[in-house]
Amino acid sequence: MEARRSFGGFFAVLVLSSLVGSATLAFASCDFPAIFNFGDSNSDTGGLSAVFGQAPPPHGETHFRRPVGRYSDGRLVVDFIAQSFGLPYLSAYLDAVGSNFSHGANFATAGSTIRPQNTTLHQSGFSPISLDVQFNEFYEFRRRSQVARTRGGVYEKLLPKEEVFSRALYTFDIGQNDLTAGYFLNMSTSEVKAYIPDVLGQFKNIVSYIYGEGGRYFWIHNTGPVGCLPYVMERIPILVSQPYESSSHLARFFLGCPSDPLVLAAQFANLRIRFCSLSISLFCQFS
């Protein structure tokens, strides 16, 4: 219990009463048997590495002492989430060797976007496994896992029970690549802002689809300050002659970013009206 309380301090947490149903996501009563995660490099535990090759050193050096598919020197937020709920680290859905999905699965891949990108990983750095593909993977996993469990033996031990899907926590950490994709194509801030409603609309659709598959508990991160990302500052040159504090060139990355949880809350408010059992918690990182 104490671990759960202390973990909550890592975030500025916004749980809006208009979005939270009777089964409120509260640390004092959480007992999730599994976590199903969707996202990008912020929560990828081996998906992209399983498809395109292992993330090279120094990734993984501070905790695992070797590369383990995470684009980080150690653990990710999703690792701490699993740990705080007493669950093992999530296996990547695309990693076929040594995976255990009885406590959930991770569909995230580094470079993923909410909207499908009309490009390849090697051309742009964006993963072809966008959020709609991740949902399709989950959709098939939910059905095929139950068929496989009927065979008994190792399948019964490594795959989740049917009732797990309605009691699991569904986590999302995705969206920043949708913003940077526009800037990498030399779009203006107004052009990026113009497609943000479509990005959020597609995100909202995926949440509703998962609800239709039995999901009830959702944990959603905002995108954070895109303008501070090192790869953004390196790939899109800043006018170094101007102080960062007053540089409109740098500020545009913040202005185009729907990082305010209230923006997300407005998008999901009508889902709460449509789905009375829906529980959504929005987490504001880096605020």
Image (cartoon, helix red, strand yellow):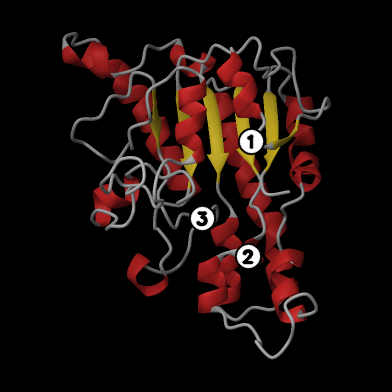
Sequence order check, earlier mark of 1 and 2: 1
Image quadrant where one finds the N terminus: top right
Is 184 situated left or right of 68 in this image? right
Q: Amino acid under label 1?
A: Phe
- Residue 164: horizontal and vertical position, in percent? 45, 14
- Residue 227: horizontal and vertical position, in percent? 65, 67
- Residue 61: horizontal and vertical position, in percent? 32, 49
**Distance between the alpha carbons at the discs numbered 2 and 3:** 19 Å
Label 1: how many Cα within 10 Å (few below 14, some 14–19, many 20+): few
The residue pinned by badge 3 equals 113
Relative depth, front residue between 263 and 287: 287
Is 185 situated left or right of 92 in this image? right
Residue that protrudes farthest toward the bottom in the picture:
241
| Residue 213 visible here | no
Rendered image: mark on residue 10: 1
In this rendering, the answer to whether 26 lies above or below 179 is above
Q: Secondary structure at mark 1?
A: loop
**Nearer mark to the viewer, of 3 and 1:** 1
Residue at the spot 40% in from the left edge and 39% down from the top edge: 107
Q: Are marks 2 and 3 in contact (CB under 8 Å)?
A: no
Q: Amino acid under label 2?
A: Cys
Q: Secondary structure at mark 3?
A: loop
Q: Quadrant of residue 154?
A: top left
In this rendering, the answer to whether 111 lies above or below 23 is below
